[in-house]
């Protein structure tokens, strides 16, 4: 996951030809449908199993990555008041809350703290946010494409954690729901782009996986 962000930051505008392997999100209902409502069962019944160091690092990173998406969509909604930015920013807040629940449950130090919008402890995320703000500010369609791009990154990062690092049942449960929700968000952005006559081409996902997501 963290490797994905490191590769993304700094090469965002020239990476359109880069596709990465991907395995679809595992079973489980999506955490939301882009309307900011989180399913209560996602955060109930935690067992509080011990975490590995890799799991701890992933939780802290994803907490800020969800903040990046929320902050980005709030900014873009101010520039281009399209409903997907408003609705999905609320969903990203729910995702941040889910990550905070994990942080509190396992007594980790929250990297977000009192940081305002657009400010990140992780330098790679800070660089990526700044690049996405510049890209998304170019116009309505570019803003929507930027939203779709960050959802691609979210999906890949979450699935990488699920495939490579996470054994803890609590963490898998949250990540699976966040991954499914990110697929919903990607579909929303792509469909709005289509309503403006723009066909979105995946930047990070393999085309076969992208088409699977869009068909659901």
Image: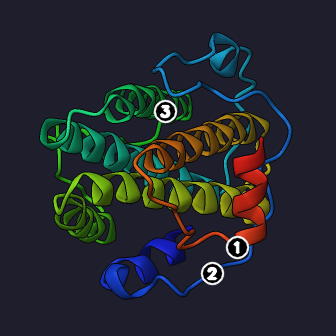
In front: mark 1 or mark 3?
A: 1
Q: Quadrant of the N terminus?
A: bottom right
- In the rendered structure, are the residues bearing label 2 and label 1 in contact, judged by CB atoms less than 8 Å apart? yes
Q: Is residue 53 visible?
A: no
Tell me where residue 183 appears, x and y as whole percent.
63, 45
Determine the secondary structure under disc 2: loop
Who is closer to the viewer here, 134 or 65?
134
Residue under numbered circle 1: 206
- Mark 3–mark 2 distance (CA, rounded to whole Å): 26 Å
Could you tell which of marks 2 and 1 lies nearer the N-terminus?
2
Q: Which residue reaches farthest right? A: 27
Disc on res. 95: 3
The image quadrant of residue 28 is top right
Rendered location of residue 108, percent (x, y) = 45, 41
Look at mark 2 in the image and give the residue it sits on: 19
In percent of width and height, residue 80 lies at 19, 41
């Amino acid at each position: 996951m963290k490797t994905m962000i490191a590769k993304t930051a700094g090469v965002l505008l020239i990476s359109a030809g880069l596709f990465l392997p991907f395995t679809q999100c595992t079973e489980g209902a999506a955490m939301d449908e882009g309307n900011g409502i989180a399913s209560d069962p996602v955060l109930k019944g935690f067992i509080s199993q011990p975490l590995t160091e890799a799991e701890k690092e992933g939780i802290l990173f994803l907490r800020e990555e969800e903040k990046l998406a929320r902050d980005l969509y709030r900014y873009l909604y101010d520039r281009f008041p399209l409903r997907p930015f408003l609705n999905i920013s609320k969903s990203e807040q729910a995702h941040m809350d889910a990550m905070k629940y994990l942080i509190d449950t396992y007594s980790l130090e929250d990297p977000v703290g009192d940081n305002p919008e657009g400010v990140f402890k992780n330098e790679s995320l800070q660089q990526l946010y700044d690049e996405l703000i510049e890209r998304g500010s170019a116009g309505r369609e570019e803003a929507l494409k930027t939203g779709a791009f960050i959802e691609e990154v979210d999906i890949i990062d979450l699935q990488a954690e699920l495939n490579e690092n996470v054994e803890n049942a609590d963490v898998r449960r949250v990540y699976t729901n966040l991954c499914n929700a990110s697929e919903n968000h990607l579909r929303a952005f792509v469909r709005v782009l289509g309503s403006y006559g723009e066909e979105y081409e995946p930047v990070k996902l393999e085309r076969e996986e992208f088409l699977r997501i869009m068909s659901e």
